[in-house]
Image (spheres, rainbow, N blue to C red):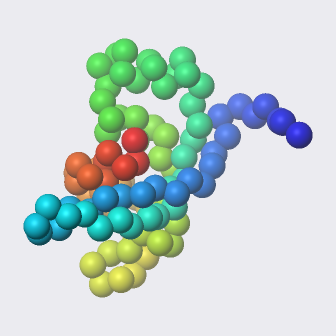
Amino acid sequence: MFKVEKSPEINWPVTVSIPRDGGITVKAVFTGKFKVLPVVEFSAIYASGGNDEDLIRIVMTGWGADVLDAAGEPMEFNEGNLSQLVSMPFVRNAIV
């Protein structure tokens, strides 16, 4: 069955390639919660001069308990923590 929904939100695995010394990467996966935009709204972000960070701030509405801080505790989804994640290019790229 196919049901058309307006701007559904979905949980989606985000695979991050974390750079390490020696030119290697380590893969880590977390659950992101995203608002699915119609193509017109998605395209409008970039057409109006927006960038990947703008897209993330519009579509990412949360994340799972698998996003942990340095102490291994789940990070709350909030503006400050989202800013911390999108400031890391390898995380930003994985989300996009």
The furthest residue to the bottom = 71
Q: Is residue 23 visible?
A: yes
The picture places residue 15, in percent across and down from the top left corner, at 42, 57
The picture places residue 7, in percent across and down from the top left corner, at 65, 34
Residue at image position (20%, 64%) is 24
The picture places residue 29, in percent across and down from the top left corner, at 44, 64
Count the numbered circles shown.
0
The furthest residue to the right = 1
Q: Is residue 60 above or below residue 45?
A: below
Quadrant position of residue 16: bottom left
- Answer with left or right where residue 20 lies relative to residue 46: left
- Answer with left or right where residue 43 lies relative to residue 47: right
Q: Can residue 62 be seen in this view?
A: no
Residue at image position (44%, 18%) is 44
- Answer with left or right where residue 15 lies relative to residue 92: right
Q: Is residue 37 above or below residue 67?
A: above
Is 78 in front, or is 17? 17
The picture places residue 75, in percent across and down from the top left corner, at 40, 71
The furthest residue to the left = 22
Residue at image position (46%, 55%) is 14
Q: Quarter of the image for the C terminus: give it.
A: top left
Q: Quarter of the image for the N terminus: give it.
A: top right
